[in-house]
Image (cartoon, helix red, strand yellow):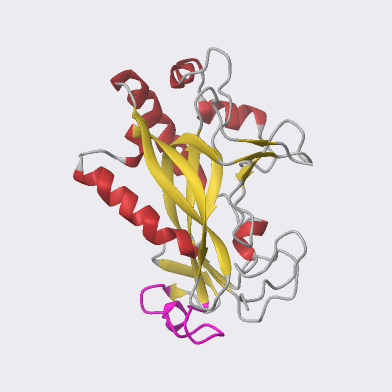
Amino acid sequence: MSTINTELTPMENAGFLALQDFDFASAIFEEMEGLNATFERIKIPAGGTTIFEIPGDDPNEPEAVKEFSAVILFHHPLNSYYKDAYTGGSNPPDCGSFDGVTGVGNPGGSSKTCPFNEFGSGENGNAKACKNRRRIYLLREGEIFPMILSLPTGSLKDFSRYLMRQLSKGNKSNSVVTRFSLKKATNNSGITYSQAQFAVDCSLTAEEYALISTLTEQVKALSQNVGYDTDETIPENVDPETGEIIEPLA
């Protein structure tokens, strides 16, 4: 059973300056040679739950938190198209894109001109058949290895707005510590879902930003080799725990 906290407790003597004694690229090469280098995932539960699930030391006991803070190291589009309706499991998509520009698979090609990436191509006549998400690589204070948060479609508008607010102030997303939280929302079909919210916690110092910038480039280079995870392959109206369809509100 997960324990609910209102905030993650930073590690003792925590700080982003710990990165100065850690070479991420070398560590990955030395420790993960011949293995599948992956990242732990911060989960957004289905059904409008406003609690994040954060991986802990015990993989079967994630920590449940209402909010957390981290630096956004890098983020990119994550598109996925499935030819057939979801029937269970976490199979990779028939066509996918890690840059939002070029799809790989069937049908593949330009994401911009693909008919499955147009509103109205989905089963309910409103959504897209190709699901658009945003994968974010995050680093929490006191840690030296990033985690991934995959934003569902319903959170992309608020994320875009947050990024534009920071750009208007001359801030890149990896130059500030961002506070993440969730609120309950309802889409046009009456389905309740969890919508991510974003706010600036604090700015990085020049010394911290220099270290974060180096890690950003290393993560960016590795990101193209990170495949799809379960929460990125299951449709957003399917409970990831049970596989059951989440019905619209009465």
Which residue is pictured at 60% across the width and 73% down the height? 94
Residue 206 percent location from the top left of the image = 29, 21
Per the image, is 140 magenta?
A: no
Q: Nearer the viewer, residue 237 or 247?
A: 247
Q: Within the image, what quadrant is residue 64 found in?
A: top right
Residue 32 percent location from the top left of the image = 66, 34
Q: Is residue 247 above or below residue 1?
A: below
User: Would residue 216 appear left or right of 35 to someone viewing this image?
Assistant: left
Residue 218 percent location from the top left of the image = 45, 35
User: Would residue 247 appear left or right of 73 to someone viewing this image?
Assistant: right
Q: Which quadrant is the N terminus positioned in?
A: top right
Residue 137 percent location from the top left of the image = 49, 42
Residue range in magenta is: 110-129
Dominant secondary-structure state across the stretch colored magenta: loop
Q: Is residue 89 above or below residue 216?
A: below
Q: Which quadrant is the C terminus positioned in?
A: bottom right
Q: Nearer the viewer, residue 87 or 164?
A: 164
Q: Nearer the viewer, residue 195 or 235?
A: 195
Which residue is pictured at 42% across the width and 59% down the height? 156
Task: Return the residue found at the far front.
Answer: 250
Which residue is pictured at 43% across the width and 83% down the height? 115
Per the image, is 113 magenta?
A: yes
Q: How many marks?
A: 0
Answer yes or no: is residue 78 visible.
no
Q: Is residue 232 above or below residue 53?
A: below
Q: Is residue 122 above or below residue 162?
A: below
Q: Nearer the viewer, residue 207 or 241?
A: 241
Which residue is pictured at 62% across the width and 55% down the height? 49
Answer yes or no: is residue 184 visible.
yes
